[in-house]
Amino acid sequence: MTFRENYRNELRAAIRQLSDRCLYSAAKWTAELLVGIDPDAPPSSSSGASASRATPYSSSSGTGGGRTLHLHRHREGSTSRRRIRSGAVDVISTPLAGVSYVSTPIPDDGDGFDGSGDAYLLAKSYFDCREYRRAAHVLRGQAGRKAVFLRCYALYMAGEKRKEEEMIELEGPLGKCNAMNSELASLERELSTFRRTGAIDSFGLYLYGIILRDKGCESLATSILVESVNSYPWNWSAWSELLSLCTTSDILNNLNIKNHWMKDFFLANAYQELKMHEEALRRYECLMGVFRFSDYIQAQIATVQYSMRELDDAEVIFEELLRTDPYRVDSMDIYSNLLYAKESLSSLSFLAHRVFLTDKYRPESCCIIANYYSLKGQHEKSVLYFRRALKLNRKYLSAWTLMGHEYVEMKNTPAAIDAYRRAVDINPRDYRAWYGLGQTYEMMGMPFYALHYFKRSSYLQPSDARLWIAMAQCYESAPLQMLEEAIKCYTRAANCNDMEGIALHQLAKLHSILGHSEQAAFYYKKDLERMEAEERQGSNMIEALLFLAKHCKAMERFDEAEVYCTRLLDYTGPEKETAKTILRGLKIAQSGYPLMDVDHFAP
Amino acid sequence: MSRLALGGGGGGGSTSKDGGGGGVGVFDITPHKIAVCHLIQVFAPPAQQAVPFPFQSIAQHNRLGLFLFSLTRSCEDFLEPPLEELINQLKAVGGLVTNWLSEHLRSSLLALSSPDDLFNFFDKLRVVLAAPEVANVEDDQIFLDPNSHLGIFLRCCILAFNLLTFEGVCHLLTNLGAYCNSTDSTYELPEDDDFNNESEMHDLLDVFDKYGHEYGSETHLGESSSLHLHAPKSACNFDEDNNFTEDNLGILRSRWQVEGYLNAQADFLEKDANSFPLNSFNAVLMQLQKIAPDFHRVQYLQYLNALHHDDYISASDNLHCYFDYSAGMEGLFSRSSSPPSDILLGRYETALLCLGTMHCHFGHSKKALEALTEAVRVSQQNNDDSCLAYTLAAISNLLSEIGISSTVGIIGSPYSFGTSTGLGTPLSTQQQLLVLLKRSLRRADSLKLISLLAFNHLALAKFDLKHVKRPLLSFGPKSSTRLRTCPVDVCKELWLSSNVLTEFGSDGLSLSNDNGAFSTSWLKNLANATSPWLKNSQKSRHSLINDFDVFQFHAQPSPVPGSVLQLTGASYLLRATAWEHYGSAPLVRMNALVYVTCFADAASSSELSLAYAKLIQQLAVFKGYSEAFIALKLAEEKFQSVSRSCIQLLRLQLLHERALHRGHLQIAGQVCDEFGALASSVSGVDMDLKTEASLRHARTLLASNQFSEAAAVANSLFCTCYKYNMQIENATVLLLLAEIHKKSGNAVLGLPYALASLSFCKSFNLDLLEASATLTLAELWLSLGSNHAKRASSLVHRSLPMILGHGGLELRARANIVVAKCYLSDPNFSISEDPYVVLDPLSQAAEELQILEYHEMAAEAFYLMALVYNNLGMFEEREEAAASFRKHAIALENPQDEENPLTCGV
């Protein structure tokens, strides 16, 4: 199929161009994608090899090539299973709903590589050795777009490096961290001039975009980044910067992006961030049609499934990923969360050991180890590793929240609140952290205060029954006793597919306390149905049966009451006796006159 | 991707709870502090004579010392001023010397160009501190005492420098370069956009090669230069200017100074929120938060700012955020630092207390009660007695402020106060209020929370003023109780509350005394004196916050903290109100005047406007409306920007009274509608306002002779007052009902109302109201026929001393007319014997009513006069009186004053 070959050609060129400009992260992503394309011809390991051979500038072409082969060897065994998974969508390799992709010409890269090429090579080597200022200095006065980009990018990196250093140096008594990238102002001035004169390429626009974002001009940054991805869609870094600026679905919907297949990756990721899981999953499965072997897509699908609480499916994918790519650390923190949720200690310890050996100074690795300790119940050690993760990446959202959970376990409530609050400040849409805050305050016996947080949390995630139940429990608690409000919350929870069935039971109970016996009976009946469907037994069942029996008797629906009573007779305990008494009463009421012999026949 | 390329090594910084490893440092050493150090060196050169080299007189020398002292203590702003401003201030300090001094300062700062220069500089500083050898100390030799304020400052600087790492020294040098150069770039135009960036780049890189860090600062300069053009720093107050954000280096002052700044801003906010535009002050706070993210007090200020601008959502968000981070440990009322050991517990009860007061402010009384009950529970649980005391006071404040007929439905939980007091029986709201106040008082007393004690005494005084104390037990042997309020108790409580003035040392309040306000105002005045072009803009602000700053210029700083002054002031204001109730006009005036003259500095604008309103009301009652309206105009100008609720209310009251007197019923009706709008429950429920609105409504109806409607309104008002236990208002309403019946000719029906009102007045010691009720009673008897004239006369004469001593124009005139009527209707009285017994009161009344423009009664007085003159056969006088009668009657019939006072000025 030719369109796959087209994709390959585009990607190969993109890898060359990206790594030529020292945009390594984007180049890495693209290269991973390249080897993920479903081979349409009989599989040739040579195509992978030629791909790696065709990138002479790639900094790590040797290892990259080796790894590609290695991946393929493993893949042969696993394709059959993947086929099954993606079989449904295999046919749809064209975009969704008949949208046609706009073909974007691959830009020619012959940008003044005659005289000044040598200087560029020198600058790039300096850059590779992280001597950014030297690299910029070598390129001073060069007018080619590529040279200008690399000079600016090197300056930006120098500024970033200095900023990171200053952040540590400047920790004053008030914990100030007003370290700014000192290059931003001059770079912005220069790039805006270039943009006005039109002497800027898409890479320059990308740099301009991130500079604007660092300066806080977010809307302008968004439009610049959109410009950049429209003219050069293969730069994943630009997409992900754009993604970080799309904090609401409104912003996302107002973006004016050309239809390119890269846009699907972006949209899928964006939906995922905005918790539109179904849509994200659909996009990813579409993309699987072309990039069948892409680890990235697999990992993303697994992450989405984890967020949708489909733990088993996600686990299968993660295991698969680890088998094909044993040194992978990306998104392994999600896997560890999953293992934590499933409480599989040994797999988690195995994972922790593996990532520890691969790269222990990755925030993800620290997080995995912390999860392991948390599951072991060693919360102090867990906190230690979460802190390390946060030291490596201060904006690591889930680590803040998880650390909050650990502090809650350790009963260190102020620290827990602090951790949760930081998570909330990084991303105010993180409902888990809001929920954690509420839970902590509730734990301290401040249900009224906790309500504020639960409200925030359920506002962000109105479909989550657990949040509504937490709120209802606050209203129901002894100091507040606001039962009407509690009922409202439980009703919401019951409508949100409450898994544990707390809501129905509580609703029934509260209604019966308030004397609304009709509603109480309704909910007891529903609860009974649910328990029957799930084949559960227990005290709730007895309670429901007892109430229904009494209620039906009171409403003079004797047949129904009899049914409930006979069911109650299956259980031992005081309720059995009560049921008998009711049955006796029923008989009397039904016959209209006292039946003496019932007493005699009673066991 | 930048982050990844940098490797995992980035992301420095630690969480706030790292034990504050780096936070122990004294303070940052900054270029500004180096400049101050340099000036100190000039001020106290080692081993010099009395007046060291550049100074010409001791006064000049001392002035520099005072200036330096103020510089290190002022809390005007949180950022350190740029060099230019320092030099301007220096020039203002005086004389030619300072010109030399500023040049010297600039050049020696510029000379510090390498790390080694800095080391040498601080070495030399050490010499300043070294005590001279005892042998050759001369009398007039100056040296800096290492324990003096400046000495400590110097030592801190030296210590901070010695603690610096080499990187720190490099940073300091970079900042110093920027600090010195910022003055030069001030007058430069911002670069054009089409500058030749190649060469610029080249130059910059060259510079960079030479000086290492100079490069980074240069870019800073480019930014700041354009911003410098907007306004000199001293001029830009937050209300004018939002964009000083990236001004100067963004270096914070010392923690002490920043805290002082924030406290001062909080005080200003509470005093007069309207002079703080919501967004621009928020921008300032955001800036501060960006520079010092761990300084959580900023969020509290953001909360206050939102609160005072009625932004519920952001107030609530900021409140929660503040307490999440600070865990209540920054101590809102216990300024003394709490022991760090209980950091694990947190003090979230404070958060609940604040949440409760916030809901109270927004009028969510139910939520406020929930929050405060929870605060009570949590503080009991955590043994936080002081918080408990404050919470109880807050609850009682809530109960007394907001009309709650009973707490049963609201608290409704087993944790209600009734049971927690240990008394099994449910208590009425008022009784609960009393119990709470007593509990809070006891706690405050035992914890030595002086200001809370004063507040509680005030609240008790307010309670005693309005409520009869009943025994709390509803069973058991009853001790005999006099069902009267006790003015002595009120006076005692008021006196106790003003005791705070003498005892404020023990509450930690004295700590806040030394808050640098004096230094701040000293520096501010300096700026004013030097820059005449600023005077206009400053003046407008000055008029708002009194003449405090001007006074402070030469005066000693006030030894009493502002909060204490405010509490004491409040006691005087309450005294004025109490005397208003008890009916002593001179004492009302006196107390209000004391408040306005002595406590205006500390008072919030709403309290101050209340005092003004009281004074103006007195003026209207005793001097007539024209004078009152002149005063009102002045007051309106003074409180222009303030939410003028108090003044606005006063204006409506005056307009209504005047309209009723003049007989402009249409206008009176309009004003009544305005009252109704103000009292609508859209913006919270104010029971006082509500009762006043319906009272005035009833009076308007009465004036237009719609008796049954008026009676209906008054009746429903009585029911409301009874429900909410507002006894004093009851007395007024009953009197009004008596008036209505009197006017409608149903004197017999009126009598019981008047008597009931009388008994209310007696049990609440409302002497003036009692006199006026007696007067009404007399009028009622009179209208029952001439055989009751004797009784009426004795009643009137009994209340005459009170009325003539303390009553207003209207009351006096009414009394005089009733006196005359009593004589006239007495069959035994013959007019020819002593005509002046009748004529004197009548002419007196006529005169006073004319001042009031009370046409109806003036007409009546003149009518009576004409009758008397007629009887006496004095026809000329009779004609004169008749003419006056005619004039007033016509004025009453057709009000010629068509202009609507609601729309036009007054």
Image: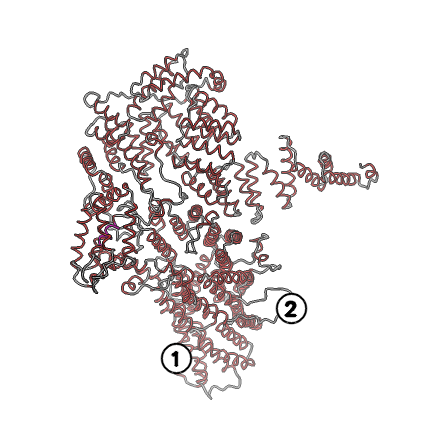
Residue A352 on image: x %, y % = 46, 29
**What's the residue at 40%, 41% (across, down)?**
B15
Q: Nearer the viewer, residue B836 or A435?
A: A435
* Quarter that holds the C terminus of chain B: bottom left
Q: Give the residue pinned by disc 1.
A: B880
Q: Is residue A132 left or right of residue A403?
A: left
Q: How many marks?
A: 2
- State which chain disc 2 sits on: B
Residue type marked 1: Glu
Q: CA distance from mark 1 to mark 2?
A: 69 Å
The disc placed on residue B477 is 2
Please tell me whether residue B33 belongs to the stretch shown in magenta: yes
Magenta residues (range): B32-39
The extreme bottom residue here reads B833
**10 Å neighbourhood of mark 2: few (<14), some, or many (≥20)?**
few
Q: Secondary structure at mark 1?
A: helix
**Tags 1 and 2 touching, CB below 8 Å:** no
- State which chain disc 1 sits on: B
Q: Nearer the viewer, residue A461 or B74?
A: B74
Residue B511 on image: x %, y % = 38, 59
B280 shown above or below B495: above
* Quarter that holds the N terminus of chain B: top left
- Residue A145 visible? The answer is no
